[in-house]
C-alpha cells in the first residue's frame, strides 16, 4: 500500500467520523430531546396563568415580598447584578458559583448575621437554606422546613389560612431522587406560582 493511499484513507476516515460525531449525532440528540423531553430540552421554562414565561425551574430567582415564599440567598444575587455597576463584585466569578469564603471569613460571618437578623425580624425561623447560599448560588429549592417557617408571614400578607399554605407546601414537595438520593425539596418558583393560583 502506498503512502498516498494511506493518507487518502486517513482523510476519508476523519471526514466520515467528523460527519457522524459533529453533525449527525448532535442533530439526532436535539431531535430526540425535542420529541421525548421538550420541556427539559427548552430550558424547563415555567409560565404564569396567562402563558407568559417567567423563569426556569432549574434556576433560582429572588423573592423578597411578604406575599411570596423567599428563596435561598445567592452570592451572585441570582445573576441580576448590573455588569456596568457591580460595586459588590457579585459577577467577578461569572454567572454562577459559590462565594468560596471560609467559615472564619469576616464578610461571610457578617452576611450570615445580617440574614439571620432579617429573618428573625420577619418572624421567620432561620434554617440553613434560608441563611447560607448553595454551591451554585442558583439553587431553586428550599427545604419543606424553610417553607413552613414562612407560612405565618404569607398567611397574614395574603389573608389566607395557614392550613391552606401547609397543604400547598405538601403538594409541591419533591421527594428524594429515585426514592433514595438527596433530601425532599420545594421549587420556590413553582410554589409561588401555585400560591398565586390559589383562589
Image (tube, helix red, strand yellow):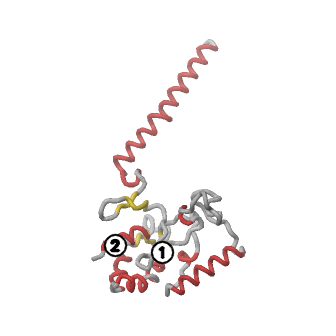
How far apart, in angstroms, are the residues tagged by discs 1 and 2?
15 Å
Total marks shown come to 2
Q: Which residue is drawn at 35% across and 49% down?
A: 36
Q: Residue at x 50, y 85 (%)?
A: 122
Q: Which labelled disc corresponds to residue 196? A: 2
Rendering coords of residue 40 (x, y %): 40, 54
Front-lying residue, 55 or 171 = 55
**Mark 1, residues whose alpha carbon is within 10 Å: few (<14), some, or many (≥20)?**
few
Q: Which labelled disc corresponds to residue 131? A: none
For residue 140, above or below residue 159? above
Residue at numbered disc 1: 64
Rendering coords of residue 158 (x, y %): 36, 82
Q: What element carries label 1?
A: loop
Q: Earlier in the sequence, mark 1 or mark 2?
A: 1
**Mark 2, residues whose alpha carbon is within 10 Å: few (<14), some, or many (≥20)?**
some
Rendering coords of residue 38 (x, y %): 36, 51
Q: Which quadrant holds residue 75?
A: bottom right
Front-lying residue, 83 or 190 = 83
For residue 158, above or below residue 107? below
Side of 194 relative to 179 (left or right): left
Amino acid at each position: 500500500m502506498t503512502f498516498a493511499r494511506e493518507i487518502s484513507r486517513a482523510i476519508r476516515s476523519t471526514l466520515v467520523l467528523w460527519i457522524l460525531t459533529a453533525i449527525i449525532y448532535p442533530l439526532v440528540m436535539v431531535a430526540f430531546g425535542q420529541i421525548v423531553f421538550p420541556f427539559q430540552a427548552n430550558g424547563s421554562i415555567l409560565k404564569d396563568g396567562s402563558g407568559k414565561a417567567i423563569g426556569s425551574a432549574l434556576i433560582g430567582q429572588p423573592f423578597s415580598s411578604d406575599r411570596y415564599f423567599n428563596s435561598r440567598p445567592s452570592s451572585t444575587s441570582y445573576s441580576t447584578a448590573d455588569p456596568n455597576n457591580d460595586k459588590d463584585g457579585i459577577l467577578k466569578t461569572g454567572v454562577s458559583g459559590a462565594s468560596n469564603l471560609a467559615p472564619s471569613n469576616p464578610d461571610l460571618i457578617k452576611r450570615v448575621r445580617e440574614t439571620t437578623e432579617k429573618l428573625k425580624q420577619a418572624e421567620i425561623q432561620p434554617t440553613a437554606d434560608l441563611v447560607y447560599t448553595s454551591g451554585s448560588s442558583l439553587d431553586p429549592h428550599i427545604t419543606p422546613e424553610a417553607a413552613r417557617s414562612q407560612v405565618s408571614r404569607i398567611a397574614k400578607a395574603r389573608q389566607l389560612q395557614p392550613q391552606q399554605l401547609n397543604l400547598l407546601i405538601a403538594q409541591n414537595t419533591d421527594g428524594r431522587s429515585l426514592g433514595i438520593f438527596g433530601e425532599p425539596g420545594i421549587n420556590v418558583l413553582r410554589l409561588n406560582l401555585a400560591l398565586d393560583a390559589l383562589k
